[in-house]
Image: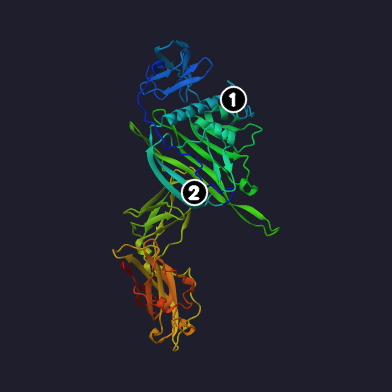
Amino acid sequence: MPTHSPRPIALCLAAAFVLCGGIHRPASSQVVQGRLVDAVDDAGIGGAMVSLVDRSGNELSRVLSRDSGLFQLSTAIPGAYRLRADRIGYATTFSDYFDLAAGDTLSLRMVAAVQAVSLKGISAEGDRRCRVRPEDGLAVTRVWDEARKALAAAAWTQERGYYRYEMMRITRQLGREGRQVVSEDRSYDRSYRQAPYVSRPAEELIENGFAQLSASESVYWAPDADVLLSDAFLDTHCFRLKEDGEDGPGLVGLEFEPVPGRRLAEIGGTLWLGAESSQLERLDFQYRNLNLPDALLGADIGGTVEFQGLPNGTWIVDSWRIRMPRGTTKLNPLDGRIMTILEGLTVQGGDVLKVVGNEGTVLETNVGGRIAGFVFDSLRAALPGARVFVEGTGIEVTTDRQGRFELLHLDPGLYSVTYSHPYMERYSYRPEPFEVEVAEGAETAAQLNFAAPRVRRILDRLCQDEEQPGEEATIPGGGVLRNHGVLIGRVTDGEGNPLAGARVRVLARAFDISSIETRVVTTEMRAGRSGVAVLTNASGYYRACWVPVDTELDVAVLEPDQELDPNTLQVGYHLSDLISWREERVLIDSDSGFATLNLRVEPK
């Protein structure tokens, strides 16, 4: 297995969940309850993160305020505290300090600051130094504070885990340029879980690295909100502002990188926030310090984590991707040494399709990239029931009554799309695929229409990709076997169900075997027969190209355990090979060059 082969899923998907219930107050706890209101009209403010903070700035507990603005916090330690209320896009509000004695329950009314926070106009040119835990008053701190609010809400949501998520997980193989989709596997899941995506603990990542590479397998991890907020991460990474540029138009970037001296596999990247809304949009990151061959290090090794705020103030990661290099080895023709080359990229990740809570559906995500169009028949009439699919993947849909299709949840990239229909499947005919580009951030679907060919055109092109025998076989007695015919059909079981992967043998007999005494076919007899062996497709159809015409053909379905190499059919066989109780006979007329024979296999 190549050193860079990423076999395990690079992100741990949590299986446990916690249902959100009422507040349980320990016997010795102290409680602070209250209401967060707007300073303008005294209306309750929901979705704000209210935290209980001591005089050293340590956060003891936190909770999201309800729609009415009500909140309740508790702590097991009496002492002096104050409340902090964080709202994305607004200045942080602090209460005065208050004392909590043992067993106290305090009720407070907290008036939220009305000052809006905008990141518009912040420039990255003022200070390009990368700072660890930047002090107050700097622009980089202002941006971090807004990112921190969303990350804290995501971490709080992850701790409680009371949502049911409908998710799609993806493993995609890309070509060397990272654009061509070679294959893709998808799986779907619907369950309560702690969070859609959970990373390894921050302390483990900082101590052991964000990737572990070995000769047998390579594993990569991406950070979640808990990791980005942790002391371990903040102490080992520095931050600075980044201009939006092409990566984030209309966004403000908070760039981070490992502090000097880190030698483990690390990450650097950028948190992108909306300049107008101050909302955290996504994290783009790249892996650093990877012990890989140079040919692989040139690939785009990294990932993306996207954040989504929910109506009640909770936050989740709703999409994530990790891109890992996929390599192979070959012999260098110049010096004879083994060299590593980049074969492509493997992408692993997932998307949240739907989020359901106690109040019902709280989020349905967009469908991502799309390819849409129509399938018509030869008269330009709609062709319903056609199967449109992306080659090498499990992505497929069926056209509706209007012949329309739409492929959903596609990442940006280049896809090979084709189609099939029952009337084409019987000929084992598949049209040439079309390459379709799904552009980054496209708001409309990429369009693609298919015009299905007439049956006559299908017949004319059935075997064009298979080499026709150049010589006609001479048979005993002076006859000639002309290999110009095409035989198609379907193999079904006793109940009429199609048999996929069944082996169909087609042989021509131009001699009488009853007078042959030997048990082994002679050279003279071999000259008197010609044949092929083919497999049925997923729908049970087979196609045998360039079989003899104007002579009887014996067609049989082989037993599942009967090994027969189609490439050696014109080599002599034991006489018993020519006899089968399941044989049917058919003759293809040279004028048409085409025949159909369906085979029904009854159980013994």
Point out the residue furthest to the right here: 335
Residue 390 higher or lower than 504, as above or below: above
Residue 189 location (% of width, % of height): 39, 43
Q: Earlier in the sequence, mark 2 or mark 1?
A: 1
Under mark 2, the amino acid is Arg
Q: Which mark is residue 172?
A: 2
Callout 1 amino acid? Arg
Residue 452's x, y, as percent? Answer: 39, 62
Identity of the residue drawn at 36% across and 62% down? 539
Q: Nearer the viewer, residue 5 or 456?
A: 5
Find residue 208 and name its label: none
Quadrant location, the C terminus: bottom left
Question: With respect to residue 212, does 513 lie above or below?
Answer: below
Residue 202: image location, x then y, percent: 54, 32
Q: Quadrant of residue 47?
A: top left
**Left or right of 310, for residue 219:** right
**Label placed on residue 133:** 1
- Residue 24: x percent and y percent? 37, 21
Between 586 and 127, the one nearer to me in the picture: 586
439 above or below 478? above
